[in-house]
Image (cartoon, rainbow, N blue to C red):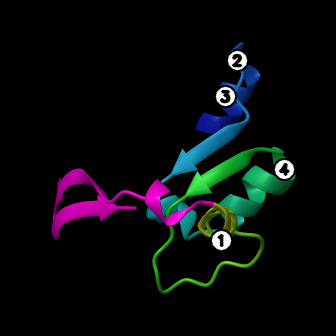
Amino acid sequence: DMIRRAQASPLRFRWVTADAAYGQDSRFRLFLEDDLKLHYVVAVPKSQQVHGPRIEDRIRREAPPEAWQRLSAGPGAKGERCYD
């Protein structure tokens, strides 16, 4: 409902982000992609299979090793949250 309301407003956007609570729901991802024609970046649990092209794979192939940095997103419930 929130995304539909945002689309009906004067606000213009082409993509949505969401955490794993939404990202693990394939119906939500299909809703964004097929029904709303929006791009998205969502977190998914590492145990979940996701099918389709992965931007991460292309970035890994094309970016030189020196382009990568490990950065902290701050402390989390299970310790420091570090990402490449």
Badge 2 density bin: few <14, some 14–19, many ≥20, Cα 10 Å: few
Q: Mark 1 touching mark 3, by CB under 8 A?
A: no
Residue at (69% x, 66% y) in the render = 58
Q: Nearer the viewer, mark 1 or mark 3?
A: 1
Do labels 2 and 3 touch, CB within 8 Å? yes
Quadrant in which the C terminus is drawn: bottom left
Task: Report the Cα–Cα distance between label 2 and label 4.
Answer: 17 Å
Q: Which mark is residue 35?
A: 4
Identify which amino acid the numbered label 1 is placed on. Asp
Number of marks drawn: 4
Q: Earlier in the sequence, mark 1 or mark 3?
A: 3
**Residue 21: x %, y % from top left:** 46, 63
- The amino acid pointed to by label 3 is Arg
Provide the residue span drawn in magenta. 63-84
Which residue is tagged 2?
Answer: 9
Q: Name the element at disc 2.
A: loop
Q: Farthest residue to the top: give it.
A: 10
Mark 3 lies on residue: 5
Query: What amino acid does circle 4 point to?
Result: Asp
- Badge 4 marks a residue whose secondary structure is helix
The image position of residue 70, as x and y in percent, is: 32, 60
